[in-house]
Amino acid sequence: MAAHRCCTIVTLLGLLFFFSLILAQGAAAAASEVEVEGGGLHLDELNRLLAPDADHLAASESNLQRWLAHVRLTSSQLPYTHVGSNSPKYASSSLASEDKHVALTVLDTRFNNSKRLESARGSSSNRKSHRVCTKNVIYVEKDGSGNFTTVQAAINSLPRRNKCRVDIQIGVGVFREKVMIKRSRPHVTLKGSSQGSTIIVYNDTASSRDKHGRLLGTIHSASVSINSNYFIAKNIAFMNTAPAQKPGAVRQQAVALRISGDKAAFFDCKFYAHQDTLYDHRGRHYFKNCYITGTVDFIFGYGRSFYEGAELVALPDFGNPGSITAQKRNETTLDTGFSFVNSRITGAGMVYLGRAWGNDSRVVFANTYMDDIVVPEGWGDWGIPARQKTVFYAQFNCTGPGADTSHRVSWARNLTAEEAAPFLTPGFINGEKWLEGYKEHH
């Protein structure tokens, strides 16, 4: 009897093992058909989509080479020819001479590495006391002589909820990486070695996908994304080298930088891309002596920003007029908008000054030189005539052949000195106080 029970148990165990093998094989087979979470893609399809595309890489590399040649120019003219193709991410293709392209005369910031580490970490007494806020410095050098070799690694080293400013000083070179500063890391400064010698570049578009197969969309196509408050950048060129696309192309927005934090400032920076170059997403922002290129909506978003001494360079858009701005204010009660003062509009492509992405979009150009590339009408209503009654598009004391207002749309405004006054100083972004702390970066 006992022997019979023993055989029965052994038989049952064998059957269980057999069925477990069948179930495991079925699960493995099913896994190959399971869609990736959030992406709706099979695994083989995901691998195909994430594989580097040779045409996109070649066009992106061509853009990078061209913009490296121009990144140091102070001239407003930007010689340019189109390259078209489709896109995924950079592969491991190297740019052997890229550092030679940016080997300018720069300030010598090379110190003994031990001193750098001490400066970056702060003294033991400073680490123990929160009553004294000492600015720390971290060095990023591609050759390994700094604290880190990538910008993102330096950012990741910062403590959360940091209350003291941290200067991340970035050496000469082309840093091919996507950079993200989370909201939990405020008071960060990214400082290049000199204007035009420090470049952060990537080439994602809105149609690119993350590692899970999900579409990035415009907001996550940015080469550099800033979500934290009190951010400062100086002497850095931000690029998205995704190739230009013909009008009507879907999901080809390619952002060089997105700023979503409050009280941010950019000094002597350059922004290179085609469509949607600078995502002035939300918050109050100050741009001083910055160089911004693009084709369509190359400064866009909900932000409340003051651009002083900006160089706005329009790239050709396959014979179609582009647009400098697409401001998103949707209610007149919202105190947002873009103000450009003492700036210049030049380039090789015809452009509108702005088009009404939001129902109550607000943009002002004052004391600005406009070349003959500005279309006579000046502004567009995004194909929604009702917005003509609610937008606030204006000029004040502008010069140049493109500043002629005699053929502007009837709903554009010419401001008096009194009407223009609120838009002429950093007071437009309440900068009288918070910009005081940024003086050393001017």
Image: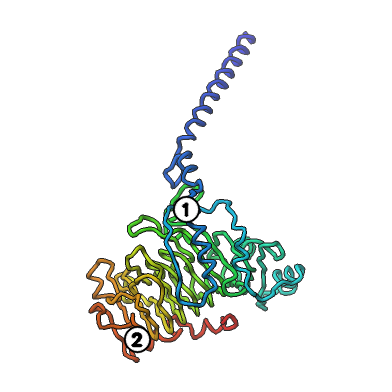
Can residue 166 be seen here? The reply is: no
- Contact check, label 2 and label 1, Cβ < 8 Å: no
Residue 338: give x, y in percent of width and height.
39, 77
Task: Using the image, determine if residue 355 lies above or below residue 221.
Answer: below
Name the one closer to the observer, 367 or 7.
Answer: 367
Task: Using the image, determine if residue 32 lies above or below residue 92.
Answer: above
Residue 248: give x, y in percent of width and height.
32, 57
Q: Quadrant of residue 188?
A: bottom right
Mark 2 or mark 1, earlier in chain: 1
Q: Which amino acid does the dot numbered 1 rest on? A: His
Separation (CA) of disc 2 from disc 1 = 42 Å
Left or right: residue 133 versus residue 226 is: right
Task: Using the image, determine if residue 207 lies above or below residue 43.
Answer: below
Left or right: residue 282 versus residue 356 is: right
Residue 369: give x, y in percent of width and height.
39, 83
Name the one closer to the observer, 191 or 167.
Answer: 191
Left or right: residue 136 versus residue 435 is: right
Residue in the image at 72% along x and 71% along y: 110
Q: Quadrant of residue 150?
A: bottom right
Q: Which residue is mark 2?
A: 396
Count of numbered marks: 2
Identify the element where label 2 is drawn: strand
In the rendering, which numbered label is found on residue 335?
Answer: none
Q: Assess disc 1: are there few (<14), some (14-19) or many (≥20) residues with their C-alpha within 10 Å of its C-alpha.
A: many
Q: Which residue is mark 1?
A: 56
Where is the C terminus found, in terms of image quarters?
bottom right
Where is the N terminus found, in terms of image quarters?
top right
Q: Assess disc 2: are there few (<14), some (14-19) or many (≥20) residues with their C-alpha within 10 Å of its C-alpha.
A: many
Q: Which amino acid does the dot numbered 2 rest on? A: Phe
Q: Quadrant of residue 200?
A: bottom right
Can residue 163 be seen here? The reply is: yes
